[in-house]
Image: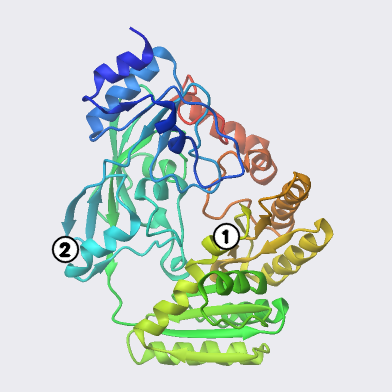
Amino acid sequence: MGFVEEVAAALPDGAVMTDPDLLEGYRYDRTDWLTPGQPAAAAFPRSTDEVAAAVKVAATHQVPIVPRGAGSSLAGASQAIDGCLILCLEQMNRIVEVDEVDQTVVVEPGVINAEISEATAPQGLWYPPDPASKAFCSIGGNIATNAGGLCCVKYGVTRDYVMGLEVVLADGTVIETGGRTIKGVAGFDLTGLLVGSEGTLGIVTGARLRLRPTPSGTATLVATFPTLGSAGDAVASITRSGLVCSLMEIMDRTTVCAVDDAYRMDLDRDCAALLLLQSDAPSPLRATEIAQASDHCAASGASYLATTEDPDESDALLQARRLAIPALEQQGTTLLDDVAVPRSRIPDLLARSEAIADSHEVTIGSFGHAGDGNLHPTLVVPREDDGTVLRRALAAFDALVLAALDLGGTITGEHGVGSIKAPFLEREIGAGNLAIQRRIKRALDPHGLLNPGRWL
């Protein structure tokens, strides 16, 4: 019996797909400028036991496994490789338990991020990590990349909310990490190790997550600026003051115009940058915080300022930011970068992005989480391009990564290393650090079957 037949026999009827036409949609993630490999099959388990069964068969046959959730990766981390088994966890999508007293939720990996807060809202609870893709990205992928989001400036990232995991290792062994308690230092922190490991150390099949009380309301500030430098100065000024907004997002003119072109939102197309800030502190403190943020923006040269505590108006403003990627995607193939720098260097990163766009003769739309220094310069390549612009864009992409490192930053803030950033990893963390990480990989996955070809 061959590998495909054996894995099909280990799973329920219909849980394994081999039809090339049907497999095509599972070869790709959102890194659409890469060419994925040809998988041998895709499996769709519904339980941890079924995941373990499929992994054991793959281990016996030495077949590589590419774990996959919603396929929203922007770093090529869930694209198929030749001959692999795609282990698609989209059908493991149950919210298992909501604990109102301990403020936790237990979920399977295929649960969509936004569904968690929807399910816990009746208990007055909320799951803060909120990527712009929260309406379609899955929690398993969020855990794999240690995803952040718009609110992470105040509330932190995925790792801060993962209390424990259920994980299938490379040989099919099932382990549990962490626990139900807030404190716990028994043994090594395997939960922290697995969060952000991009499916290279184990396959997450369940997670216990922290929740927080839902904020009672928000106040929102929109500010536009005549130059990128003045917007960066406002971010630095607010940060220096100690004011902690629950959200601080930035969009440059290219991104603002792309969103306005696509969705007709009546945005200020003449501004160099648009800054969105929000406070979710209890009333009346949130109004005070937004007034203070407005003063900092005005002192930095803002050309327009407006505030609101109306939920619908706030949602409309935030929607403009969440639509940045889809809007730029409508203009062509996008190479979306994900870099982070110390917040004090945001003006420098914005300036470097402009200079790189000019020197490489490419379009770059910059937007992202100004509050924590995590920006997403996005290169746009016309779909009718003969390869000329793509070559310049790839060079500009690399230049942006190197610029972040030169400014004391990182090659990835929240999207992960995946396939596209692997060449830069050693430069950031050093040869000795990388060697230790590879030793950990070999200890947990000695045959290198879990998501090979990524960063380890």
Closest to the observer, 42 or 405: 42
| Quarter where residue 257 is shown | bottom right
Q: Is residue 432 left or right of residue 69?
A: right
In the rendered view, would you say 271 is above or below 173?
Answer: below
Choose the circle earlier in sequence order: 1 or 2. Answer: 2
Give how far across and how far down residue 360 sits, in percent. 81, 56
Closest to the observer, 248 or 65: 65
Q: Residue furthest right?
A: 359
Give how far across and how far down residue 79 sits, in percent. 50, 36
Residue drawn 63% across and 82% down? 234
Circle 2 sits on which residue?
A: 100
Give the amino acid type for the residue marked by disc 2 in the picture: Glu
Q: Secondary structure at mark 2?
A: loop
The answer to whether residue 172 is seen in the rendering is no
The answer to whether residue 24 is seen in the rendering is yes
- Quarter of the image containing the N terminus? top left
Q: Which mark is residue 206?
A: none
Give how far across and how far down residue 28 sits, in percent. 50, 39
Circle 1 sits on which residue?
A: 330
